[in-house]
């Protein structure tokens, strides 16, 4: 049975310390990329919202952390996402390897632009 969480803090706290650090950094990266974003649990995972609409989900798994969905991207961003591309519009970042936080930031900014969250 999957554990149910009420807050993103509860979700993050349920993982081992090394994964908590990664989730915390992903969370901070997303919020700094889209100031004014909010968060909640949706579909059992952390969901970052902007202006009451979902923007991006992230989750930890046994061997990786994931980010959903993928934006429509220019050639450079597509190229940089390629090594992490998983099924169904997912980026998978293996645990135990460096997490590309700058790429996560770029993906989130592209999603925000795509959804009209900001023009910058």
Image: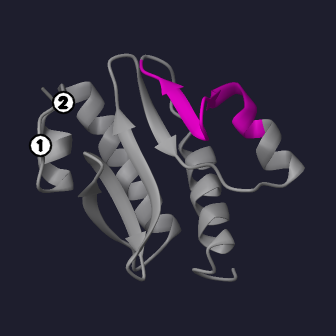
Is residue 92 highlighted in magenta?
Answer: yes
Secondary structure under tag 2 reads loop
Q: Is residue 116 left or right of residue 68?
A: right
The one nearer the camera, 29 or 94, is 94
Secondary structure under tag 1 reads loop
Q: CA distance from mark 1 to mark 2?
A: 13 Å
Percent position of residue 82, x then y? 74, 31
Is residue 102 highlighted in magenta?
Answer: no
The residue under label 1 is 4
Count the marks: how many? Answer: 2
Specify start and end residues of the magenta stretch as a single range.
80-95
Percent position of residue 71, x then y? 67, 55
The residue under label 2 is 15
- Residue 63 sits in quarter: top left
Picture residue at 82% right of the left edge, 38% below the top: 79
Q: Is residue 52 left or right of residue 7?
A: right
Picture residue at 32% right of the left edge, 18% below the top: 62
């Amino acid at each position: 049975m999957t554990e149910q969480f009420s807050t993103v803090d509860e979700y993050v706290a349920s993982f081992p310390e090394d994964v908590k650090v990664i989730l915390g950094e992903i969370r901070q990266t997303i919020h700094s990329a889209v100031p004014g974003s909010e968060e909640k649990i949706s579909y059992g995972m952390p969901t970052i919202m902007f202006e009451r609409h979902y923007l991006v989900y992230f989750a930890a798994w046994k061997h990786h952390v994931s980010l959903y969905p993928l934006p429509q991207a220019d050639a450079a961003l597509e190229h940089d996402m390629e090594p992490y591309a998983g099924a169904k519009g997912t980026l998978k970042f293996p645990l135990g390897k460096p997490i590309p936080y700058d790429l996560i930031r770029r993906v989130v900014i592209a999603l925000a632009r795509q959804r009209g969250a900001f023009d910058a």
